[in-house]
Image (tube, rainbow, N blue to C red):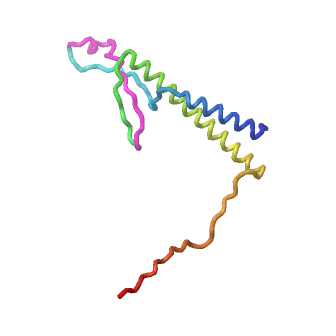
Amino acid sequence: MPTLQQLETERERLKNRLAQVGDMRAGSLVGRFRKCGKANCHCAQPASEAHGPSWSLTRAVEGKTVTKVIPAGNAVEQTKAQIVEYRRFRKLIQELIELNVQICDQKLEEGSAPSVSKKNGTRRRARRRRRSGG
């Protein structure tokens, strides 16, 4: 079992790796092929290829699916790299959470965790005395 010092050193290493995270975005990138529906287009012929791919990025925002069209070419490669970076970020965060659980558990076992105290009762507000003036 690693020592508390080793765990804290590992936590600092993870924090440094998090600081190096680049451009990222969540979502799924999908290339779609479709037929345009024009009777005289090549895609209307049997066994012909459809148009595409047209790229779209989908992700959940506040419980709803949001779609963004990604232009073909370099933007597709950039988006793929950003998604990979997002997944790397999520993995690092999960590692950091797990590491912190180990650190907190070990501190509890060693008795070095700061104690938490609560005051019983309620706070009283100081009342201002009214001057009776005349």
Q: Is residue 59 magenta?
A: yes
Q: Position of residue 68 (x, y in %)?
A: 35, 29
User: Splitting the image into 4 quarters, where does residue 88 fall?
Assistant: top right
Q: Position of residue 76 (x, y in %)?
A: 41, 19
Residue situated furthest front in the rendering: 134
Q: Is residue 58 magenta?
A: yes
Q: Nearer the viewer, residue 84 or 96?
A: 96
Q: Position of residue 29 (x, y in %)?
A: 42, 26
Q: Is residue 39 above or below residue 114?
A: above
Q: Nearer the viewer, residue 67 or 102?
A: 102
- Seen in the image, is 112 located left or right of residue 71? right
Residue situated furthest bottom in the rendering: 134
Query: Which residues are drawn in magenta?
Result: 40-62
Q: Is residue 64 above or below residue 57?
A: below
The quarter of the picture where the C terminus appears is bottom left
* Residue in the picture at 39% in, 21% down: 31
* Residue in the picture at 77% in, 37% down: 2
Q: Is residue 4 above or below residue 26?
A: below
* Residue in the picture at 70% in, 34% down: 9
Q: Nearer the viewer, residue 64 or 40?
A: 64
Q: Position of residue 65 (x, y in %)?
A: 38, 37
User: Splitting the image into 4 quarters, where does residue 72 fall?
Assistant: top left
The quarter of the picture where the N terminus appears is top right
- Seen in the image, is 76 located left or right of residue 3? left
